[in-house]
Image (tube, helix red, strand yellow):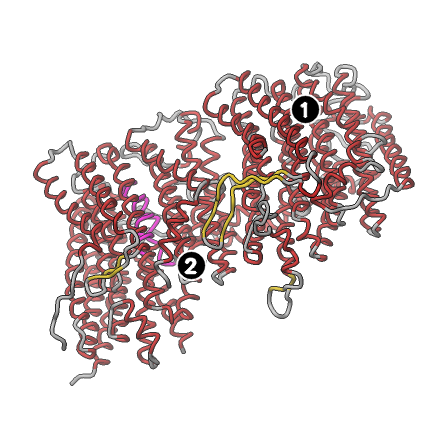
Amino acid sequence: MDALTIPPVDLGLIAPLLVVVTWATGLLLVDTFFIPVGRKKLTGYLAIAGLVVAGLVGLPLWGVSGSTFGGMVRLDPFALTLTWVFLLIGILSITMSLDYLPRQDIEQGEYYPLIMFAVSGMILLAQGADLIVLFLGIETLSITLYILTGFAYPRLTSEEAAMKYLVLGAFAAGFFVYGIALIFGATGSTRLSEIGAYAADRDLGDTNLTLLLGGAAMVLIAFSFKAALAPFHMWIPDVYQGSPTPVAAFMSVGTKGGALAALVRLLFEALPTLNAYWLPVLAGLTALTMVVGNLGAIAQMDVKRMLAYSSIGHAGYVMLGVMVAGEQRGPEAFIFYILVYALSNLGAFAVLIALEHQGEEAWQLDDFAGLYQRQPLLAVAMAIFMFSLAGVPPTAGFMAKFYALTAAWEGGLPWLALVGVLTSAIAAFFYLRVIIRMFMTEPEGEPAPELNRGLTIDIVVAAAGTIIIGLIPAPIFALVERSAVALGG
Amino acid sequence: MVPTSYYVLLSAILFTIGVLGVLLRRNAIVIFMAVELMLNAANLALVAFARERLGVEAQVIVFFVITVAAAEVAVGLALLVAIFRTKRTADVDEVSTLKG
Amino acid sequence: MELLIWLIPLLPFIGFLLNVFVIRRERTAGLVASGMVAAAFVVTLIAVGVLASMPPEERRIVSTAWEWINTGSFQVPFAIMFDPLTAVMALLITGVGALIHVYSIGYMHGDPRVVRYFAYLNLFVTMMLFLVMANNLLLLFLGWEGVGLCSFLLIGFWFERKTAGEAAVKAFVVNRIGDAAFILAMLAIFTYFGTLNFYSEGEGGALGFLERVGDIAGLRVGPNWQPIFVSTAISFLLLIGATGKSAQFPLFVWLPDAMAGPTPVSALIHAATMVTGGVYLMARTEPLFVASFTTQGWVTWIGALTALMAGTAAMAQWDIKRVLAYSTVSQLGFMVAACGMGAYVAAIFHLLTHGIFKALLFLAAGSVIHGTHDTQDMRRMGGLKDAMPVTFRTYLIGALALAGIFPLAGFWSKDEILAHAVGHGHTPIFIILFITSLFTAFYMGRQVALIFFGTQRDPSYHPHESPQVMTVPLIVLAVGAIIGGAINLPVLHWLTDWLEPVLHEQAGEFNLWLALIATIGAVGMGYLGWWIYTTNAAKIKIGGKDPIYRYSGDIWEGMAEAWYLDRLYQRTVVAGFERLSDFLARVFDPQGVDGLVMGVGRFFGGLANSLRAVQTGYVRTYALVFTVGVLLVIGFMLWIAR
């Protein structure tokens, strides 16, 4: 056995991650000792500041490519762009929580550092180039999310959601670790690039191939679970419905982005030669996901649950880009879709928060009745989000979906693009239903929804982003294009 | 020396028992134990492979896995206590209000 | 000049923004909305003047606002263009649109949501203009979806009425089918041509796909045992898109129901402009269609069949608007059939004249409805010609134009289509279309007799003439319906020459014999229709059967139900889906499929409910499903590794 040597470490390459983690740790202490109960919003502001600083720290790293910690952590434009997207998701989620928590009587200071830790887990997933790092990233994200899901304690639905999430999450983690063990057994490494080289260079032999395939399958399943691919999606509706709304919003875009970013690396660095094995599996899962997610949403009268199912469907559309990430258009479509989906979905959840009253579940479809008469701008914003999620031009959602479909079509999966087109035709139903309620029914004497500063900022940013990216997506495409070049297959 | 395949086979059996435990038992604590069994089965496989491959990484992973498992169980037990306070049960089947 | 053509869609858009954010008063809303569309019409006229001053081959102005998508190989500009084909469409949209806006001021007076109505209407005009002005398929699709959305909102505008909501959803569902095909067509075109632009952008730019149709000549795709030509695949997908939007067989069922919307909306969207979007699409992508013999055959037969089915259905309706709706479907069938036979100019010619006189008929029908206090059943009308003189005269002109009586607009355009069918050996198509044109004359004669002649059968209301704000647009349109044929008279053929740079078509031969026979036939059938329903006026009872029913019996029933196509869907597709969905979902709750009136929706609702049944709420069930998934995935991967 080799003697242990400590590999050279370049902390510069993980600067944003470092900032988020240290800031969160510091904030946890500051919150406990210096910020009085009732003023916890201050913690939230500090958390936002930390995420902004982390984003700024990342700026000079643009264009830098390198790895450190002995090749376990990688920084490239792909990871950096995703890092920014994740930071944005974190910021928007915290903004919409600022007033939500006190309104629901669940304000605790540690909420904000926990979100930051979750963001750090996502960044780790985008930067990880080793199965150990990916495991750590996914667990950092998951464990914080278990706590956040149960944050509305002692509301039973919240506790139940957390329990379900934890049991299934731990179950999936078991498969993940066992998969790592098998992959290590087959190749003798956990480094993605080394696994890839091993699988490509040698004739594996029957035993090793079996071990590698079994391991790869288990790891893929763990990621599928996180990304909500059917049939590993069952936890999504219950967990989203039960958890505090900002957490559901954060989860819907965050876990998907993190898990799939890691999946892109795993597939195209470690397993490109096994393409013939995983592509049909993932394509099948993707098709099933699009069908199940969009069909499941039809039957929902609870808008929050409807959005949960819709997020399953969207996981399928994101996967269209992931599976063909070997081509230039694949990762482009993936990053673009994640960004657009984050904006539209966070916006939609922010509208839900505006309609939510303490203790009650005020997201039934009927609560949207005549919203246009009560709050015209809120209704218009919600309509924009719904159209974007449904993929109607000129919103960003259309661009993203069209681009993802094109990527899949060109990448040799035209039948999957066909499934995508058809399911998104079905999907229009349930998004449209919300719009019908808002614009084409009379209000039913509900009190006016509460709109405060944080929510307003969130909704305006998301709505403006959705429209602007739909009309002038070229700058975003340029950014995404340069991020994808660096991945290089 | 015992061949690696024996260890792997044992770990596979343990893992399966863990999976079945999650599927069949209703008590949340037992479910956590079953998950622990799955994780430790994986640890066993890792150590066995590490010995065969003479690689140190796999043994490092084992420590990470143990740590993470501890964190997971800590959160899980805290949750369980909370649920027990509200609902007076540790049966996961009785915590099923969210559905459809 | 580039700025000028941008003004055309932007003026109504400004009107939309003003109506959404600024205007709160009914009067201002109507004035601003009408003013903006009228201004757009003026700008279009100027642009046409500029275009006419250019040499014919160079008559295309393209203006790129910005690069919409710009990544490596994938480039789509946000660009509009103005060429002869766009010009005539824009003139129709803004011209007829402006008149309908003005008319709406009177028609919608007193409605509680007028401001919103005008906002939707302005948005519709904007989107329709984008549809016809787009220089690439993606922007065309933006307009395509946009008009569909506005149509949906306006059909369901009076959402207090249950039928309005159902009709809106039905229209939306049917159009989704077309839209899915449209997206697939875009993907296919991009794959084979690498661009979605119709034509090159200015000098030296990369060629658009319509200029490179030769690239896919002879190329085939599909399984080895039955490969099809790429051109056929693409054009067929576009055809499906067009049948949804232009209400062709078998997707026309939504249009008659769409009459639940306000009548000016029916005139603008469901007669003059949006429903002609499919015809425009086919004319615009004409090289793709011409490249596929197979698709052209389908186009022709779908058009002819639709014309005949809808024409017979129109004869047996009692609802004043449903007659016109089926008539619209029938006339759209004429246009589609003309496209299929390669007579694109004739199709566009008929599109234009039809846009004018059908808008006239709808507005006049609206005037009748308005003056009879929301009566739509023609059995409750009769003898209105004295009470509503202006409406009567304009209606008569519209009816004569539609029937194809010399020398009104409809005569010339319909004759051109028929002459083409005869001249190019499409005899069966000619026979179908000729019979349909006789039916057309008959049902218009019947309708005029039922509404305006005889005595008023329902004395419970006092009919009155509509205010000037409504009658003036009628008079203007009536003038258009009289002289509209002048744009493509047989010897002068201005329209053919004007469209020559786009459609490359030579003027057809004028067939004097055909014209004579067609006119005599139309006059005869029109008179027959009028005669039957004036002499038998006493036999028409409110809620009773048609006088002809005694002689024709069940056939008449079949016509009244549009040959049961709708009911066929109900019995087969819907019922089948229902049985299947009942089977799928033991716990079928009507709540879950709220608002999904269509059987297809029920089917998916049933599937969705069966999904819900799996979602038991027990975490162990979820773990079980998870495990099954694991076994399948690992099993599959090891199985192919074998």
As displayed, is residue A156 above or below residue A316? Answer: above
Query: Is the C-beta separation of discs 2 and 1 under 8 Å?
Result: no
Where in the figure is residue C386, as x and y percent of width and height?
79, 15
- Residue A94 visible, this orientation: yes
Q: Looking at the picture, tell me which residue is in the foreground, C442 or C6.
A: C6
SS class, disc 2: loop
- Left or right: where C117 falls relative to C376: left
> Mark 1 Cα within 10 Å, few/some/many (few <14, many 20+)?
many
Q: Residue furthest bottom?
A: B1
Task: Identify the image quadrant of residue B66.
Answer: bottom left
Pinpoint the chain carrying mark 2.
Answer: A
Give the residues in magenta: A231-259
Where in the figure is residue C436, as x and y percent of width and height?
80, 41
Amino acid type for the residue under numbered disc 2: Gln
Give the distance between the C-alpha atoms of the residues marked 2 and 1, in whole angstroms. Answer: 56 Å
The residue located at (77%, 20%) in the rendering is C392
Prevailing SS of the magenta stretch = helix
Q: Residue furthest left?
A: A33
Q: Is residue A390 magenta?
A: no
Q: Quadrant of the N terminus of chain B?
A: bottom left
As displayed, is residue C345 above or below residue A371? Answer: below
Residue C366 image label = 1
The residue indicated by pointer 2 is A328
